[in-house]
Image: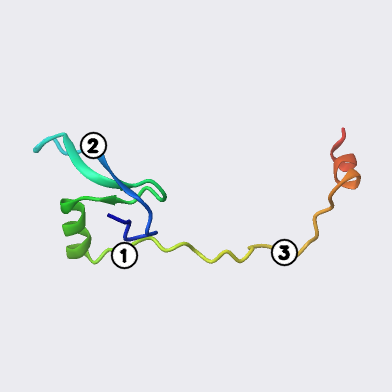
Amino acid sequence: MSCSRCNGCMVDDFLLDMEDSSGPMWLQAKRCMNCGNVAESMLQRNRETQGARLHTPASSAPVGNDATVPMGVEATSNLAA
């Protein structure tokens, strides 16, 4: 089975439910070795009913000013106290 998020390798895993005490505390699911995505029937049903979307990474564009950062001796001499 491959991951629906990153197409990585899914492995069997056991998860511990720390919140809900009404049902079994341990459940078996599939977890992606690459991104950590968890595939489990109850989670899938909740995602479908609530209309949740998979996480999409934000743009990798740098935020902030375009100031240059000095490298080498110039950069470290300013840091000396």
Determine whether the residue tagged by mark 1 lies in a helix, strand or loop: loop
Q: Could you say where residue 36 lies in the image, as x and y percent from the top left?
A: 37, 47
The label number, if any, that marks residue 65 in the structure image: 3
| Mark nearer the viewer, 2 or 3 | 2
| Mark nearer the viewer, 1 or 3 | 1
Q: Which residue is mark 2?
A: 14
Q: Could you say where residue 37 lies in the image, as x and y percent from the top left?
A: 33, 51
Residue type, mark 3 in image:
Asn
Distance, label 1 to label 3, CA atoms, is 32 Å
Determine whether the residue tagged by mark 2 lies in a helix, strand or loop: strand
Give the quarter of the figure containing the N terminus: bottom left
Picture residue at 67% right of the left edge, 62% below the top? 64
The label number, if any, that marks residue 21 in the structure image: none
**Among the two numbered marks 1 and 2 on one chain, the one whose residue lies closer to the N terminus:** 2
Contact (CB < 8 A) between labels 2 and 3? no
Distance, label 2 to label 3, CA atoms, is 45 Å
Q: How is the image coloured?
A: rainbow
Residue type, mark 2 in image:
Phe
**Among the two numbered marks 2 and 3 on one chain, the one whose residue lies closer to the N terminus:** 2
Q: Is residue 65 above or below residue 23?
A: below
Residue type, mark 1 in image:
Arg
Q: Is residue 59 left or right of residue 48?
A: right
Distance, label 1 to label 2, CA atoms, is 24 Å
Picture residue at 17% right of the left edge, 64% below the top? 49
Q: Which residue is mark 1?
A: 53
Q: Residues within 10 Å of mark 1 (few under 14, many from 20)?
A: few
Q: Is residue 20 above or below residue 36?
A: above
Which residue, as the protein is rendered here, is positioned at the far left? Answer: 22
